[in-house]
Amino acid sequence: KWYKHQLTYQIVNWPWYLSQHQVRQAVKAAFELWSNVSSLTFSEETGGPANIRLAFFDGEHNDGARHAFDGPGGALAHAFFPRRGEAHFDNAEHWSLNGKGRNLFVVLAHEIGHTLGLQHSPFKNALMSPYYKKLGRDYVLNFDDIFAIQNLYGAPSSGRLVQLPGKQFTMFEDWSEEKKGVTDGAAKPYYCQSMFDAVTWDLKETLYIFKGRYYWMVTLDGNVSEPQLTQQRWKKLPAFVEAAAVSGSDGKFYFFKGGRCWRYKGSRLEAGFPQKCSENGFPRHPDTALYFPPLGHLVVFKGEKYYVINEESMMVEPYYPRSIRDWKGVPPSANAALAHPNGHVYFFKGENYWMFNQDTLRVTASGKWVQDLSWLSCQHF
């Protein structure tokens, strides 16, 4: 249990197709379910540290293999008891606040219960039942939920319980078309909220940003497209690609995930692909890839090594891999990289970027990519 009664919470991120305002409403209502029947009070913390953090993740997210999310269906969320104070939600689910998908409010309220120290209830109508409750005319919390929370923290100081029926929480608004792919508040494209999976330029100088199942196109003048499903354009391409690059010689798209690679001419998957490129010497689960103009080749990075690729044979060139120390100042295990039309190469890792000069072969600038790189269009909103 928590050894204080005034707790703070923080919403780290949220699904891009739900508005920030409605998510905050749902989270506030979920916490109020518990404060209405106990001595606890909750307030949102938007800046500094908070007692309880709510975040959406894809797949493995540093909680150990048994806590890795498994895509749509299956495990929806998990939470940690006090005093770790975290609840994680599977970003691959189609979450809803209007009853048309996975009901986010119910899952929020249940997982928040765990962050307060509540175990599962043996009563099937309890919110803390092992199975997520459906919202109806009955109260969201049943007597066992109330007994459990008051056993830990006591009754409200007013002595009055506030119970609310489930149907009251079925009318949160979902996302609107004009806000598609853009959040309220900060009002930035979803890819600006956290590190993307891959990034590359095509020969028409259009920027492609990949994150999860979606991609965005950004023009040189800063116009950002709506998010598009990667599989609608590149058939048979899986979600969550690990690296992407466009060849500067013929404009073909290359994608990498696990030990496999895909090559597309436009939107058409070329014959013989996907290939098990790891059998040709490619690293499994590469960190990033790019086309490096001075070499005229694709370069794939993994950890502290880099591999130069022959596009015709799809083999690693002789005498590679080599140490990333050849790229002076570039950090190992970058999340994404690209060669920019401005003549520089950019590497991304977490919230930081490094600008690499192709002539001097060393990093000449670094900083925060959301704030500093206007061509990503994160400041335009």
Image: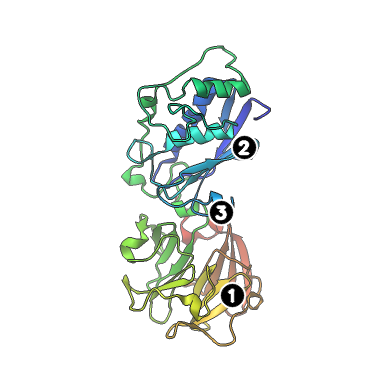
Colour scheme in use: rainbow
Q: Is residue 328 above or below residue 129?
A: below
Crowd rating for badge 3 (residues with CA inside 10 Å; few <14, some 14–19, many 20+): few
Image quarter in which the N terminus is found:
top right
Task: Name the amino acid, label 1.
Answer: Asn
* Disc nearest the viewer among 3 and 1: 3
Query: Which of the pair 362/75 is nearer the observer?
Result: 75
Q: Which residue is mark 3?
A: 65
- Give the residue displayed 34% in from the left and 77% down from the top: 270
Rendering quarter of residue 220: bottom left
* Location of mark 1 (residue): 357
Identified by mark 2, the residue type is Ala
* In the displayed structure image, the side of residue 374 where residue 203 appears, left or right: left
Residue 152, horizontal then vertical, whole percent? 62, 24
Residue 293 seen anywhere in this rendered image of the structure: no
Q: Amino acid at mark 3?
A: Ala
Q: Which residue is disc 2 drawn over? A: 50
Q: Nearer the viewer, residue 262 or 175?
A: 262
Q: Earlier in the sequence, mark 3 or mark 1?
A: 3
- Relative to 351, is 300 above or below? below
